[in-house]
Structure formats: C-alpha cells, structure tokens
Amino acid sequence: MQILSTPNPHTEANPLTPLVEVEGVSKVYPKKDGGEAVILENVNLTVNEGEFICVIGHSGCGKSTLLDMISGFRQPTAGEVRVAGKRVSEPGPDRMVVFQNYALLPWKTAFENIYLAVHAVYPDKSKAEKTDIVNKHLAMVGLEEAANKKPKQLSGGMKQRVSIARALSIYPEVLILDEPFGALDAITKEELQEELLQIWSQHKVTVLMITHDIDEALFLADRVVMMTNGPAATIGEIMEVPFPRPRERAALMEDPKYYTLRNYALDFLFGKYAHDDE
Ligand SMILES: Nc1ncnc2c1ncn2[C@@H]1O[C@H](COP(=O)(O)OP(=O)(O)OP(=O)(O)O)[C@@H](O)[C@H]1O
C-alpha cells in the first residue's frame, strides 16, 4: 500500500523508468529438522532508475535475504527479480554490494582493494586507466591521503568509504547497502550519510539500502519500504519521503512532516508489527 502520496521531488524531475523489479518473490529455507521455513512470501517491488530506497523491518524478517536475491547471491524459491528487464540469476557488476563489516582484504591497501575490483571487471583497460578510476573514486570519498594504508590503519568510517568507493568504481547500475553504517559512531554515521547522498546525486546510481535507523531512512530515501514480521514476511507499506533535495538535516528536523512520517514508521514497527524480542 502506498501512503502519503506527495509527489517525490527526485523522481518527479525524471521520467520513471523501472530498473529493479521484484515480482511475486518468495524464499523458503530448509529447516534443520527437515521442515521448511518460509522467510519471504509474495514480495513485489519496483524500484525506478535513480531512486534511493531504504528497507526497514525487524531483525530476522528477511531484509538481507531480499537484497541478496537482487544482488544475485541467493535465488528466489518462487517469483523472479529483474534488473533492467533481465532476470537475475547470479551476481554481476551491474549490482554492487556494500556490507556493514566492510569486507576489505586486510593485506591490501585501500588503493589495491579498489584496483583489484576494477581489474576483475575491466581487465582490458590499461593500467593507467584503472589507476585513474581508483584515484578518482578515492578522491570522491576524500581518501587520497589514505591510498597506501591497509584496513587496520583505517578507522571504521574510512574503511566504509573505501568499500563504497570500491563498489562505485565498477560503475554499477544498482548499489546495494546492507546496514552500511550500523557499526559507526553517530558523528561518522551522519558524515557518511551526507557523503552518500552527494555521491548518489552525482553518480545517478540507484540505491537499495537496509537500515534499522528510521531517521537515517527519512534523511536518505525517496521511499521507505517497511517489511512485516516473519515468518512469511512481505512488504507491509511503502512510505513516500517528500522532502526536497538537496536535504539539510537541520531543516528536516524542523519540518512537522518529519515527525508525522517518523511516528508513522515507528508505529508500524513497534505498534502494528511489534516484535516480542525487542
Ligand atoms: N541460509 C539460510 N538457511 C536457513 N535460514 C536462513 C538462511 N539465511 C537466513 N536464514 C534465516 O532467514 C531469516 C531472515 O534472515 P535475514 O538475514 O534475511 O533477515 P534480516 O531481516 O536481514 O535480519 P537482520 O536485520 O538481523 O540482519 C532469519 O530467520 C534467518 O535465520
């Protein structure tokens, strides 16, 4: 169900072109005792080109499973996922994923971590071209100075910047972020949210991001996808976020609409779909 039908300022400027289509998707995992666990049931979602989507829902409802089926790391039990009209059957460079734990190779420098990814996807480019792409993306996240540092010499925020730079250096159509700022302190998290918005608007990449933080979702997203609880979770509601862009956190906080949306999402999670364990 769509609520709060205020036109979306980002997508309104562009014609809506569906890029990611999740159609009738269900996911069943085998249980240890031999039975089956229905994790997701009949999930339907269309994400338009250039949109920024946040997915929220209680722990264990199947958010990562859903995004894994878009990235191609897992396959639906029923239904299908299409990206640019093509059925997703495996991971591909058109869909890059950034994880909470950075997933950097510890023995490689920031530069080398990104270079490896660029080389894997564009082996035919010259060394100079690949180096240029890496340096451009290190600069994009403000890490030129840290190019030769290894992950253990970098802060959590810097490591996540490297992960984002690595993902974008492949020029994906879809950037998938699984709780990317969950391990960061509040100040670093806010800095990275702002950088991510800038990068998103410059790169025109389509973003799908899991978060547990409603304020983060309202600051970043065009639409917030709210999942029901499992088992057999699905999309309960999709909330349009009507704030104009570029967004300023302070201005957002002063907008009464912000609290209406925030309370709506909180009520969805902790009223309508309250979770016993939380
Ligand atoms: N390979 C698997 N085999 C069996 N069950 C699995 C498998 N992967 C995930 N699950 C189960 O599927 C459910 C959904 O997991 P998933 O990680 O997608 O949830 P989530 O909403 O992303 O959780 P969180 O917010 O805690 O990261 C959980 O109950 C999990 O234990």
Image: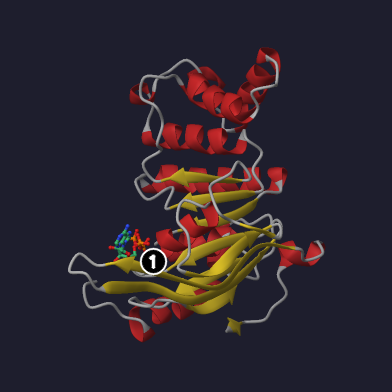
Residue closest to the eye, 133 or 44? 44
The image quadrant that residue 277 belongs to is bottom left
Category of crowding for the residue at label 1, using alpha-carbon neighbours closer than 10 angstroms: few (below 14), some (14–19), many (at least 20) = many
Q: Residue at x 41, y 59 (%)?
A: 64
- 127 vs 275: above or below: above
- 120 vs 108: above or below: below
| Quadrant of the rendered image holding ligand 1 | bottom left
Q: Residue at x 56, y 22 (%)?
A: 115
Q: Residue type at mark 1? A: Gly
Q: Is residue 209 visible?
A: yes
- 84 vs 170: above or below: below
Q: Residue at x 44, y 32 (%)?
A: 158
- Please name the residue that numbered disc 1 is placed on: 62
Residue 264 pos. (x, y %): 47, 80
The image quadrant that residue 46 belongs to is bottom right
Residue 246 pos. (x, y %): 68, 54
Q: Is mark 1 within 8 Å of ligand 1?
A: yes
Residue closest to the eye, 176 or 194? 176
Residue 174 pos. (x, y %): 62, 50
